[in-house]
Image (cartoon, helix red, strand yellow):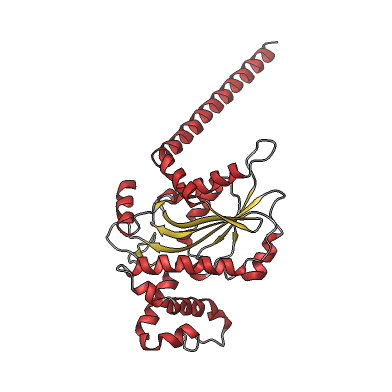
Amino acid sequence: MAQEHATKVHKYFPQALPQSLVVEGAADLLHHRFTKESGDPGDILFASSICPDEINRDIEESTWCHGLGRPFTMGGLAGFPFSGKVGFGAYMAHVPDGGVLLIISASHVGIHSTEDKIGLIRRVGMHKDSHACGSAIAALEYCEKNVADIAEIAAGTKLPLDVSDLLNAQQNYVTQKVAQNYEAITGHGEKMVGLADTLAKVVEKDVNRILPENIPFPLAILSGVQINFEGETFSDDYFNPLSFKIIEKGQTHDLMPELLQYAGEHHGGHHDRKKEHKNKDKEEKQKKDKEKKDKHKKDKEKKEKETKK
Ligand SMILES: [Zn+2]
């Protein structure tokens, strides 16, 4: 299945990598870059700006596995950081002393597990397909239907939902952003790829817009497209990394070459290392079981001796 998924993904996103490998690489590079004097890996606080769709949560299992802890979730529909400047400002106060903050910012797109379809997936327990990202696709469909008014949609004077109801704010915002980038999206040969890649860049721009001018700790931003497969294990999703950078003392450094190098070096071994972990777990469990059995045996013998006395 893994090879089948890779072939499907690479048809649309030739540079995409297993999502768990990208997370592992980003975590590894930051852990090393900020190694403490004690030799322990540096502390990383993790925030995400990704769509709330449940199929996107697999990334959090990966981040958990690689010591990134619980995320601060900034993302609303289509991944835009709707928690905004105030939300981010509050989160800034949570960064551990001497630690680094990693933001993973992404759009997402589903790839069908059994058919050759992009933007559509078959969710668990359903007999029909549904959109992913539903918010982004709804926004694009509205723009396509009202293409004569695209300038008004982009300006926010013609929007799909009642603007007086603030509960519509997120979807109206996504629609406006799609309209503002309509040419880049529809100019791509594969519209769903154009939508996902363009929105990933627009979401990252917004993430940068909510950052304060002076950031008192190193801040890394990994940006790209989450590529979802449904109904499989968490390690099956892919990620198309578009940029990985770090802002340190006002200077921005490009970490993308290091991330791609890491991925190249560990791609083959990635799954083997997982297996290694599994085998290690198994060995440890067997060892513990044996210890338990031995203890049980000893206790039993002790009791028997005592009753004989
Ligand atoms: Zn979505």
In the image, what residue occupies the spot 64% across and 20% down?
Answer: 299
- Residue shown at 34% from the left, 55% from the top: 14
The residue sitting at the left extreme is 116
Residue 219: x and y in percent read 61, 56
Location of residue 114 (image quadrant): bottom left
Residue 199 visible in the current orientation: yes
The residue positioned 56% from the left and 48% from the top of the image is 64
Name above or below for residue 226 compared with residue 61. below
Tell me where residue 68 appears, x and y as whole percent: 59, 49
Q: Position of residue 261 (x, y in %)?
A: 45, 44
Please say if 275 is above or below 170: above
Q: Does the rendering let one see residue 130? A: no
116 relative to 250 in the view: left or right: left
Percent across and percent down for residue 108 are 43, 63
Which one is in front, 72 or 43?
43
Determine whether 239 is above or below 262 in the image. below
Give the farthest residue toward the front.
251
Along the horizontal axis of the image, is 71 left or right of 152? right
